[in-house]
C-alpha cells in the first residue's frame, strides 16, 4: 500500500506542470447546496482548454483566420 501511495504522489508531481496550465482548473460554482468545486469528467471526448495551446491559437494562428462565409 505504501508503494501505491508513493506512486500516486509521484504521478501527481509529474503531472503538476500540465495541470496548472488547464484553464480555470480550480473553479467553483454556487449550487443550492453552497459553493462546490467543479469536477470535470469528460476528458476523453473534449478535455478542457489548455493554456499553451490556446495561446498559440490566439497569438500565431488566430490573426490569420477569417470567417469563410463573409
Image (cartoon, rainbow, N blue to C red):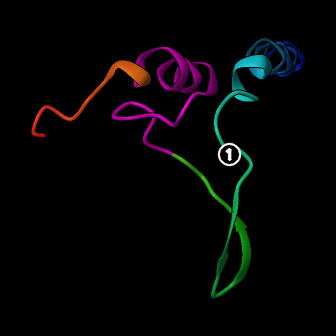
Residue toward you, 17 or 62: 62
The residue that label 1 is drawn on is 24
- Expressed as whole percent of the image width and height from the top left, the position of residue 23 reads 64, 38
The answer to whether 50 appears left or right of 12 in the picture is: left
Q: Which residue is at a point 76% across and 29% down the rendered structure image?
A: 20
Foreground residue among 37 and 48: 48
Q: Quadrant of residue 44?
A: top left
| Left or right for 13, reference 61 | right
- Picture coordinates of residue 50, whole percent (x, y): 57, 28
Magenta stretch containing residue 61, yes or no? Answer: yes
In this picture, is 56 found above or below 20?
A: above
Q: Is residue 16 above or below residue 24?
A: above
**Does residue 27 sit above or below 46 in this rendering?**
below
Q: x, y (%) of residue 22?
A: 65, 32
Quadrant containing the C terminus in the rendered view: top left
What range is drawn magenta here? 41-62
**Quarter where residue 5 is shown:** top right
Most extreme residue toward the bottom, as rendered? 32
Instruction: Residue at 42% x, 17% y: name it.
Output: 61
| Viewer-closest of 54 and 35 | 54
Amino acid at each position: 500500500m505504501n508503494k501505491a501511495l508513493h506512486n500516486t504522489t509521484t504521478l501527481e508531481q509529474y503531472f503538476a506542470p500540465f495541470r496548472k496550465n488547464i484553464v480555470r482548473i480550480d473553479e467553483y460554482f454556487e449550487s443550492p447546496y453552497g459553493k462546490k468545486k467543479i469536477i470535470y469528467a469528460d476528458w476523453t471526448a473534449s478535455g478542457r482548454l489548455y493554456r499553451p495551446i490556446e495561446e498559440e491559437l490566439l497569438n500565431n494562428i488566430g490573426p490569420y483566420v477569417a470567417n469563410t462565409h463573409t
